[in-house]
Amino acid sequence: MKGKCNAQGPQQRTRSRRVREWFARRRRVMATSLLRGTCYGAGTGIVGLAFWWLENNL
């Protein structure tokens, strides 16, 4: 009985390795999207607080 070869070629990548490679290729896009979303959220919060302050103090 012959033993099986456990060497993984380029076609036999594990799922976790494919996910890591996917994240590595898209890291800059994800970082940019995260920064943009954070800025939109902060801007929305500031505008909301400004209107709330105006309603309560005028």
Image (cartoon, grey):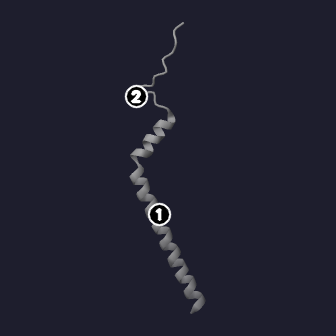
Cα–Cα gap, marks 2 and 1: 36 Å
- Tag 1 residue: 37
- Residue 24 lies in quadrant: top left
Vertical placement of residue 48 versus 27, above or below: below
> So how many labels did they put on this image?
2
| Amino acid at circle 1 | Gly
- State the residue at coordinates (50%, 35%): 15
Q: Residue 16: x, y in percent? A: 51, 37
Q: Quadrant of the C terminus?
A: bottom right
Residue visible at 49% across and 32% down? 14
Instruction: Name which residue type carries label 2.
Output: Pro
In front of the other: label 2 or label 1? 2
Label 1: element kind: helix
Secondary element at tag 2? loop
Circle 2 residues within 10 Å: few <14, some 14–19, many ≥20: few
Residue 28 placement (x, y as % from top left): 39, 53
| In this rendering, position of residue 32 left or right of residue 2 | left
Q: What residue is rendered at 46% in x and 41% in y?
A: 20
Chain-order first, disc 2 or disc 1: 2
The image shows residue 37 at horizontal and vertical percentages of 47, 63
Q: Measured from the top left, where is residue 48 in percent x and y?
A: 54, 78
Residue 25's place in the image compared with 42, above or below, is above
Q: Extreme right residue here?
A: 56
Instruction: Give the number of the disc on residue 3.
Output: none
Q: Which residue is mark 2?
A: 10
| Rendered view: 5 above or below 29 | above
Q: Indicate whether 9 appears above or below 50.
A: above
